[in-house]
Image (tube, rainbow, N blue to C red):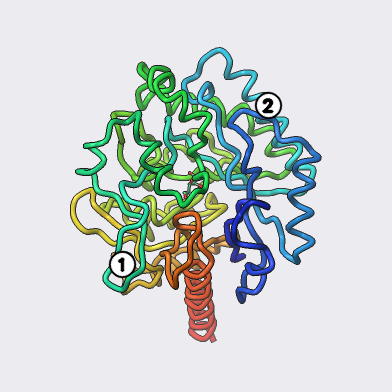
Amino acid sequence: MQMTLRWFGPTDSIELWKIRQIPGVTGVVSTLYDKKPGEVWTAEEVRGLKKLVVDAGLELAGIESVNIHDAIKVGSPERETYIDNYITSLENLGREGIKVVCYNFMPVFDWTRSDLAKLRPDGSTVLSYRQEDVDKVDPTKMFEQMDANSNGFMLPGWEPERMARIKELFEMYKDIDDTKLFDNLVYFLQRIMPVCEKYGIYMAIHPDDPAWPVFGLPRIVTSGDSLVRLMKAVDNPHNGVTLCSGSLSSNPENDIPAAIRALKGRIHFAHVRNTKHNGPKDFEESAHLSSDGSLDMYEVMKALYDIGFTGIVRPDHGRAIWGEVSMPGYGLYDRAIGASYLIGLWEAIGKSATNNKG
Ligand code: DNO
C-alpha cells in the first residue's frame, strides 16, 4: 500500500513540505478545489497541480474528487453533456498518469455532520453526528450551519454556488428514488468505462456518509453489500471502491473487515479512520487508535493486507489537537499521528505474516 494525505491544493493551510516530513507518506491525493461539479478539468490545470506536488518531492497518487454534476445523478437530458465533460476531464487526468479517481454519488449533500467541533474530555475536538440534532435542522439551512463552523474554509463537497441553489436541488431530486439513482450511476459508469480502460484509470466510489438516508434523500452506497452489488452491475475492475472505514462504520451493523474481503480486487483507495458509537445514529470521529473508538483498526488493516491490497491509503479526518486551527477534520497533527499508526500496524502485520510463513 502507499500512504498518502489529502491535500486541497495551494490554498490548503497545510503546506506540502510538511506532509513530506511525515515518515512513510510518499504522496497526496488532491483536487482542483475551485472546480464546480460538471466543469472540464483542462490538461494545463492538471499539469499545474501535478507539478506543485512533484516539485515538493511527493507523488500525485490520485484525485479526490472529480465531483459529479447533479444532472448525471438525476438522469436529466443534460447528463450527456456533463458525462462528456467528465470524460474529457478523465482524458486529461489519464494523460498525466493519474490512476485513481475518487467520487461519490450522494444527492445534494456530500458528507454531513451535526457538529464540526465536538469537545472531548482531553480538550481535543472532533466531527460528530447525532440524528436527533440533524432532524431539528431545516435542510435548506444545513449549509449555513456547516459553513459557520468551518473555520473559514470551503468544505469539500459543500460548494457555496451549489448550496445557493439548495431549494432547486431538492426539487431536482423529488422523483428520484434508490432505484433511479442506482440506474443513473450504472449508466454513468458504463459510459466512462472505455476511457478508464484506455488510460488505466480506476474509479473509486466513496460510500455515503453517514450510511443512511438523510433529509429523505436517497442513499445507495451504504454497506458492503451495496458496494458488491454495484461492482457486479458494472463488472469491470476500473469500476471500484474507496473503502472508507469511517463512513461505512457510522452504521455499527457494517462489518468493515468482511466488506473489505468481499471487495477483493475492487478497492483502489482506502480511507482508514475510527468511529466511536455513542448510541443509535449517534457517533463521533475518534482518534485512529483502536482503543479510542469502536473499530478494531488492526482487523481493518489486516483485511486489507489479506486481500493483497496494493492501492493508496490515507488517514481520514483527524481530531483538532494542540491548538491547531484548520479545515475541520483536515489538520496536520492528528492525521500525521494517524498515518504513523496505520503504517505501524501494516509493518507489524506484514512482518508477522512473513515470520509465520518462515
Ligand atoms: C469528507 C470526505 C468526502 C469525500 C467525498 C468523496 O471529508 O470524506 O468529502 O471526499 O465524498 O467524493
Secondary structure of the residue carrying tag 1 is: loop
Q: Give percent across and percent down for residue 74.
A: 46, 21
Comparing 63 with 145, the one in front is 145
Q: Residue at x 64, y 51 (%)?
A: 11
Secondary structure of the residue carrying tag 2 is: helix
Tell me the residue that label 1 is attached to. 293
Q: Residue at x 31, y 58 (%)?
A: 118
Tell me the residue that label 2 is attached to. 85
In this picture, is 307 found above or below 131? below
Comparing 164 with 312, the one in front is 164
Q: Is residue 306 visible?
A: no
Mark 2 Cβ inside 8 Å of ligand 1: no
Q: Residue at x 52, y 36 (%)?
A: 159
Three-letter code for the amino acid on which mark 1 is drawn: Gly
Three-letter code for the amino acid on which mark 2 is drawn: Asn
Is residue 108 toward the left or the right of residue 41 in the image? Answer: left
Is residue 215 toward the left or the right of residue 305 in the image? Answer: left
Q: Give percent across and percent down for residue 101.
A: 61, 45
Mark 1 Cβ inside 8 Å of ligand 1: no
Q: Give percent across and percent down for residue 173.
A: 39, 21
In the rendered image, which quarter contains the N terminus? bottom right
Query: Which quadrant of the figure has residue 23?
Result: bottom right
Comparing 238 with 313, the one in front is 313
Other-residue count near label 1 (Cα within 10 Å), few / some / many at <14 / 14–19 / ≥20? many
Chain-order first, disc 2 or disc 1:
2
Q: Residue at x 32, y 31 (%)?
A: 139
